[in-house]
Image (cartoon, helix red, strand yellow):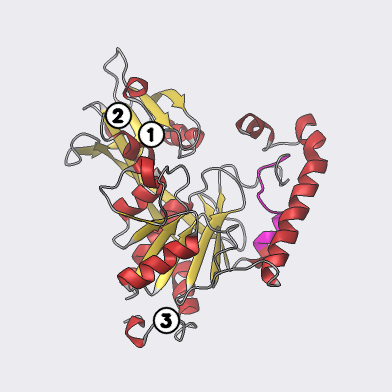
Amino acid sequence: MHWLEQYWYSLNLVSLALWPLSLLYGGFMTLRRWAYRRGLLRSQRLAVPVIAIGALTGGDSGATPLTIRLAEVLQTAGYRPGVVSRGAGGQSQQWPRRVKPDSDPREVSAQAMLLAWRCRCPVAAGPDLAAAGRSLISECACNVILAVDALQQYTLGRDIEIAVIAGQRSLGNRSCLPAGPLREPLARLQSTDFVVGNGSAQRGEYLLTLEGGQAVNLVDPLVTCSVAAFRNESVKAVAADVDPAQFFSFLKTQGIRVLEHSFPEHHFFSAAELDSDDDLPLLLPEQDAIKCRSFANERCWYISFQARLDPELERQLLARLGRFPGKTINPSLQPE
């Protein structure tokens, strides 16, 4: 489907030709959601509140950094959150899997590894998000579950939904697949509890901003520098899981001359793909860098992005969670 993406962000002959198929797809997704809501298809409810975070569009939206920030907010408020990921791209033969900072990203996925790196809370991965959530509740006494990229994963029951919109690409031509980027019809946003705009926010949305001021050496993480240190220099930039165009654009706004190298989502790099005859620094997003730790050289740096979220959303989310005091496995799991 990657070749179609160039047609998703405008009205053109290709998207118009595919429009009837997008109507069928959108109708199917609407019917599917209705079946889950009516109990014709079964959702699995957990003993603790579940916050489902995801996007209406395909590709990188910012759901992962938003999840990392929300885990911090919940921990500060006294909750014991756990994070579940589908482990998309992971090759494990056994699910669910507890994910730790030293896990193998080929087994559990780079996204799950990034969550384990950055979240100071338990993380589990697996296609069955409910099973992953139950493992965290029973083994780690988590009293709230954050489910990333779970907006359309209706087999997992949820109490709160947060939709993320990539500000730069927005909703494209507002058509469903395959004519546009939408995984569900646009009306789906009206049924979510919160809508977050990554990079820019429209009326009724909450702003999420990503700040990437630090570059970290992949061989020695204790060696860091400001992204501005590469200003007016030429660098080789590589991206796959994080939207390459957005990553390259960020580097260019910092005054860096970028030699772009993009790869498909979930691509696992080889040493040869990172090696070159020149001595140029090589910059990667953190999620892609995780997959290169075993063969990186001293020229490899990753950019660590920090999420800043509208404080009003944080306040309202905590207020909403306070309405679920009885949905815990035992009284000791109440937030402090």
Against 88, is 285 above or below? above
- Point out the frontmost of discs 2 and 3: 3
Q: Nearer the viewer, residue 96 or 250?
A: 96
Near mark 1 (Cα within 10 A), the count class, few <14, some 14-19 or many ≥20, is some
Q: Is mark 3 on a helix, strand or loop?
A: loop
**Vertical arrangement, residue 103 with respect to residue 84, above or below:** above
Out of 241 and 250, give the one closest to the viewer. 241
Is the residue 310 above or below the residue 214 in the image?
below
- Check disc 3 and give the amino acid type: Thr
Q: In which quarter of the image is the N terminus?
A: top right
Q: Which mark is residue 230?
A: 2
* Mark 1 or mark 2, earlier in chain: 2
Q: Earlier in the sequence, mark 2 or mark 3?
A: 2
Residue placed most toward the observer, 180 or 214: 180
Q: Residue furthest front?
A: 93
What kind of element bears circle 1? loop
Majority secondary structure of magenta residues: loop
Q: Which amino acid does label 1 sit on?
A: Gln
Q: Residue at x 36, y 34 (%)?
A: 284
- Name the kind of residue labelled 2 in the image: Phe
Q: Are marks 1 and 2 in contact (CB under 8 Å)?
A: yes
| Residue tagged 3 | 328
Alpha carbon of mark 1 to alpha carbon of mark 2: how far? Answer: 8 Å
What residue is shown at x 48% (from left), y 73% (from top)? Answer: 46
- Considering the image in quadrants, where does the C terminus appear? bottom left
Q: Residue at x 47, y 55 (%)?
A: 208
Which of the pair 240/259 is nearer the observer? 240
Relative side of 251 to 7, left or right? left
Q: Name the residue under label 1.
A: 254
Q: Classify residue 193 as left or right of residue 274.
A: right
